[in-house]
Image (spheres, coloured by chain):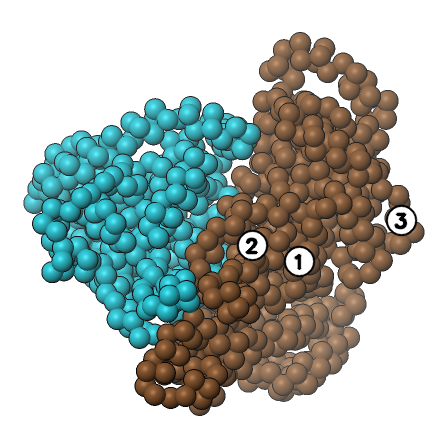
């Protein structure tokens, strides 16, 4: 089952638009890269106009990410070195001391609209039940997304009972299946990436809060950028392979920075001054709960690691504050300024222009 | 192709050209949105398209309320049981591969169905994760969205519209206007062979992007679609280089129908310039080489201008007037009506799928889905039943509680609050600001309750639907900003507009609540003529008609000193009367909330 997925992924990989070829939309790209460096930040929500390359960017991520080490034949792609969060097979009584591993691409799993619940959580393996009369569990999308990314396009159109299910698993990091006579639990830790258009309807507050970073994107206004977007898209459609090759070097460069950032991350220091700044900013904006502050610090640390800096500074905080906080402001419908503007104002007041 | 450049192209000719370009590159162009009533014109257009497409290209009709299983594919129950292993059934979208999917009554498509189709169009494959199957079926198709929408808020979902290159309006075309097709299927086949080699110069690309921006088109998908249309046009003409007239044609067909603003014009009235004499285009066509030799910087601007001119020539007449009046186009993007998830229950409404569930009171068992769920287990359960000692014949199909699938329904019990705001006279500005505030406050609350809010403003001689029912705060803010005030009070028209909107809300199964903010002193009659007595008479008559709808209505009298007229009006429409001379946004919204709950 995992093998089948890998094959498909390789196939689509050759066809996805390269990450570094995406014009503008820097905040979205940065947010996604930070969450790739520190998955504990809690996912990225991308809301914005149509035709701004939201889906393109996320799909490009699959080809960009450095491959990961995974236990061979483990249906969940468990990491070899961690004792926590392993599946039954890798952590059970039959598990080998040093299992064989191999390099696999980080999964970026697309959750298509119209998906059924059984495919999300996993269900009975139809093939084996029908042909061999065996009761076996076939892992679903959550299992496939373990250690990787789960992407939901048009997240605001997702059916409510699926949203509930996702929230539950995302919070616990574990998928528990008790149905159809099956009783399975397996780790499912993934970064949730959602995208959508606010004009189709707002997102439920519970789901909104669950995302670590939130990015608002709009179509670029200036003509040269717009032309470049259309030109690259056109070039890609005409000759996908040649086009992908053109950007291979830049993609490799970015990949190196992600790997370096991940290594640096545990060593990045957050000085007390930065902690205080973050607290002040959240206070000034009146964000609900502690989650905002925590995300702000983590994202700043992730950015520092990505930039190769060993210490979190005001500069880092300033850059990640809008995506970390803008969806946590209490709604004030009479304030015509959008939440981005309000965050911007608060930053300016606190840090000076 | 030269004659297609002529400005006097009839709407039918344009539609015909669109059919031709679409037939050359259905996947690249995405599709055609055809706004027309069911009738001979639409049938003829579809027939033309059918003729142009290669004979073996599928052209499948997608029924409006198609279930996901049929749309995307799923488990083929009969074949699965027979074969003893899972057999997938291809969905309609997969069957459309290489051809065209025709979506009937697309204006009533739910945004989730539209979203599914759009996702398949983008990925060029159906990604299936259903019924225990996970697979990818590559498919490329174009879409024809048949739009029979009559009112403002019956529109094809934007998520789909954005991906369709051509937006045609066939409503003004009469049967006698129809003409023979411009191309044959052989032309299309030839064009398809050239298409992969068609080159586009940077200048053309820049001109299309520039024109799109000048017309206020935000989505970057649009200039890209225009580019594809221009390519198809060149291929149809037998050239492997996109020329200016192809770009101009693409601008007319793809960009112009989406215009949301008029390009800033340096000179006065550039759009009323004489159309270029018909001799000119052929001349240009003959010496494109000469043109390339000239200073490109000098030529850039004129090319973009000419493309822009072509687009402007096709702007719908009404739109042009609207744009010039500075009202801003009632762009489609701000008016798609049925967005967002409806409340879903399990008893009434339109079925939208199934889920695993207990057979509690009122839940409706879906037999087919239940059997489908039980199917894979049959060998297992039969073996177990035998082991337990029951006779093999005792049970034909073993169904357990886990298999039960119940049908989910859209339960439409949402409330839609319609505001009718009097924007006339001197106090308008203040009143309007407060009304805007109240709408936004209510909307913030609706956002939690998942209700909708709509807004009609009336001033001058007519009432305008400024905000089609929505629960999107973003869209509401956009519509409310820049709402003008002043002029007469066309109360009767406003009441009529509310009645029409309320009817359409009701048709959708939601419960309308109407809130009027006015001083109740009409001075513009239904026919637009002035005169207080006639206007009042009309308003009272309209109010009585509205009363017949038996809605919950609240009339907020905003005049500084509440007067009889307001009360009379409230009585005529059987509304609750709320005199609030100094209402601010907060009081207003809380008053409406108490009154309407």
Which residue is depicted at the point 76% across and 45% down?
Answer: B55
Which part of the image, by quadrant, shows the N terminus of chain B?
Answer: top right
Mark 3: give few (<14), some (14-19) or many (20+) Cα within 10 Å.
few
Residue B330, percent from left and from top: 63, 53
Is residue B573 rendered to the left or right of residue B16?
left
Q: CA distance from mark 2 to mark 3?
A: 33 Å
Q: CA distance from mark 3 to mark 1?
A: 25 Å
Residue B117's disc number = 2
Report which colour depicts chain B: brown
Q: Please report, as a chain letter, where disc 3 is located.
A: B
Describe the element under mark 1 as helix, strand or loop.
strand
Q: Which chain is cyan?
A: A
Is residue B133 rendered to the left or right of residue B1?
left
Which residue corresponds to mark 1? B103
Which residue is depicted at the point 43% across and 35% down?
Answer: A14
Q: Please report, as a chain letter, where disc 2 is located.
A: B
Q: CA distance from mark 1 to mark 2?
A: 10 Å
Of A267 and A197, nearer the camera is A267
Q: Earlier in the sequence, mark 2 or mark 3?
A: 2
């Amino acid at each position: 089952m995992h093998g089948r997925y890998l094959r498909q992924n390789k196939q689509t990989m050759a066809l996805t638009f390269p990450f570094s070829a995406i014009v503008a939309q820097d905040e979205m790209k940065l947010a996604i890269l930070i969450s790739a460096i520190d998955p504990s930040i809690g996912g990225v929500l991308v809301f914005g106009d149509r035709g701004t390359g939201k889906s393109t960017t996320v799909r490009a991520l699959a080809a960009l990410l450095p491959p990961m080490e995974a236990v061979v034949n483990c249906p969940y792609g468990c990491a070899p070195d961690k004792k926590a969060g392993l599946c039954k097979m890798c952590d059970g009584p039959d598990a080998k001391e040093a299992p064989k591993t191999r390099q696999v691409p980080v999964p970026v799993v697309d959750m298509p609209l119209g998906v059924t619940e059984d495919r999300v959580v996993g269900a009975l393996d139809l093939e084996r039940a029908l042909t061999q009369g065996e009761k076996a569990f076939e892992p679903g999308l959550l299992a496939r997304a373990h250690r990787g990314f789960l992407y939901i396009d048009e997240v605001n159109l997702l059916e409510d009972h699926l949203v509930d299910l996702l929230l539950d698993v995302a919070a616990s990091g574990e998928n528990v299946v008790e149905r159809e006579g099956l009783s399975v639990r397996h780790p499912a830790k993934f970064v949730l990436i959602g995208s959508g258009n606010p004009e189709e309807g707002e997102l439920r507050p519970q789901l909104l809060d669950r995302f670590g970073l939130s990015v608002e994107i709009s179509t670029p206004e200036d003509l040269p950028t717009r032309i470049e977007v259309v030109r690259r898209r056109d070039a890609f459609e005409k000759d996908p392979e040649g086009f992908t090759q053109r950007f291979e070097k830049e993609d490799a460069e970015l990949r190196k920075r992600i790997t370096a950032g991940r290594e640096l991350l545990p060593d990045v220091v957050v000085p007390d001054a930065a902690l205080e700044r973050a607290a002040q900013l959240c206070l000034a904006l009146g964000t609900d709960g502690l989650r905002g502050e925590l995300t702000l610090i983590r994202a700043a640390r992730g950015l520092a690691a990505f930039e190769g800096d060993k210490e979190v500074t005001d500069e880092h905080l300033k850059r990640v504050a809008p995506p970390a906080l803008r969806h946590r402001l209490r709604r004030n419908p009479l304030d015509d300024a959008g939440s981005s503007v309000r965050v911007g104002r608060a930053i300016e007041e606190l840090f000076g222009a | 192709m030269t004659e297609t450049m002529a400005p006097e192209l009839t709407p039918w000719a344009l539609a015909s050209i669109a059919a031709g370009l679409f037939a050359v590159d259905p996947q690249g162009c995405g599709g055609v949105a055809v706004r027309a009533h069911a009738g001979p014109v639409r049938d003829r257009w579809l027939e033309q398209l059918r003729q142009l497409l290669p004979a073996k290209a599928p052209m499948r009709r997608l029924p409006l309320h198609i279930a996901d299983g049929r749309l995307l594919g799923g488990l083929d129950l009969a074949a699965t049981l027979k074969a003893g292993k899972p057999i997938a059934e291809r969905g309609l979208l997969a069957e459309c591969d290489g051809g065209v999917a025709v979506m009937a009554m697309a204006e009533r498509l739910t945004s989730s169905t539209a979203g599914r189709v759009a996702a398949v169009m983008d990925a060029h494959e159906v990604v299936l994760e259903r019924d225990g199957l996970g697979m990818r079926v590559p498919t490329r198709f174009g879409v024809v969205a048949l739009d029979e929408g009559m009112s403002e808020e019956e529109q094809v979902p934007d998520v789909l519209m954005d991906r369709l290159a051509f937006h045609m309006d066939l409503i003004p075309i009469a049967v006698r206007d129809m003409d023979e097709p411009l191309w044959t299927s052989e032309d299309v086949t030839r064009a398809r062979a050239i298409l992969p080699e068609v080159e586009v110069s940077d200048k053309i690309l820049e001109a299309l992007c520039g024109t799109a921006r000048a017309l206020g088109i935000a989505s970057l998908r649009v200039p890209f679609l225009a580019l594809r249309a221009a390519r198809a046009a060149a291929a149809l003409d037998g050239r492997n280089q996109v020329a200016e007239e192809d770009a101009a044609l693409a601008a007319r067909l793809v960009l112009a129908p989406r215009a949301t603003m008029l390009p800033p014009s340096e000179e006065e009235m550039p759009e009323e310039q004489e159309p270029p004499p018909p001799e000119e285009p052929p001349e240009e066509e003959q010496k494109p080489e000469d043109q390339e030799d000239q200073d490109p910087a000098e030529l850039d601007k004129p090319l973009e201008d000419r493309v822009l001119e072509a687009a402007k020539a096709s702007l719908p007449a009404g739109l042009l007037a609207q744009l010039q009046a500075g009202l801003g186009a009632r762009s489609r993007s701000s008016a798609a009506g049925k967005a967002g998830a409806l409340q879903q229950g399990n008893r009434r409404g339109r079925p939208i799928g199934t889920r695993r569930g207990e057979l509690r009171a009122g839940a409706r068992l879906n037999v087919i889905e239940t059997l489908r769920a039980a199917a894979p287990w049959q060998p297992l359960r039969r073996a177990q039943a035998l082991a337990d000692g029951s006779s093999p014949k005792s049970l034909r199909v073993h169904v357990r509680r886990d298999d039960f699938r119940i049908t989910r329904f859209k339960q439409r019990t949402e409330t839609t609050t319609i505001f009718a705001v009097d924007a006339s006279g001197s106090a308008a500005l203040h009143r309007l600001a407060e009304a805007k505030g109240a709408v936004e406050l209510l909307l913030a609350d609706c956002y939690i309750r998942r209700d909708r809010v709509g807004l009609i403003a009336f001033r001058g001689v007519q009432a305008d639907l400024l905000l089609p029912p929505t629960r999107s705060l973003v869209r509401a803010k956009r519509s409310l900003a820049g709402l003008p005030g002043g002029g007469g009070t066309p109360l009767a028209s406003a009441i009529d507009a509310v009645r029409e909107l309320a009817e359409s809300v009701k048709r959708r199964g939601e419960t309308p609540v109407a809130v009027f903010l006015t001083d109740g002193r009409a001075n513009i009659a239904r026919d637009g003529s002035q005169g207080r007595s006639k206007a009042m008479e009309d308003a009272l008559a309209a109010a009585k008609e509205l009363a017949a709808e038996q809605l919950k209505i609240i009339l907020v009298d905003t005049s500084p000193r509440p007067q009889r007229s307001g009360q009379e009006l409230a009585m005529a429409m059987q509304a609750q009367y709320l005199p609030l001379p100094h209402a601010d946004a907060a009081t207003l919204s809380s008053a409406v909330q108490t009154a309407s709950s």
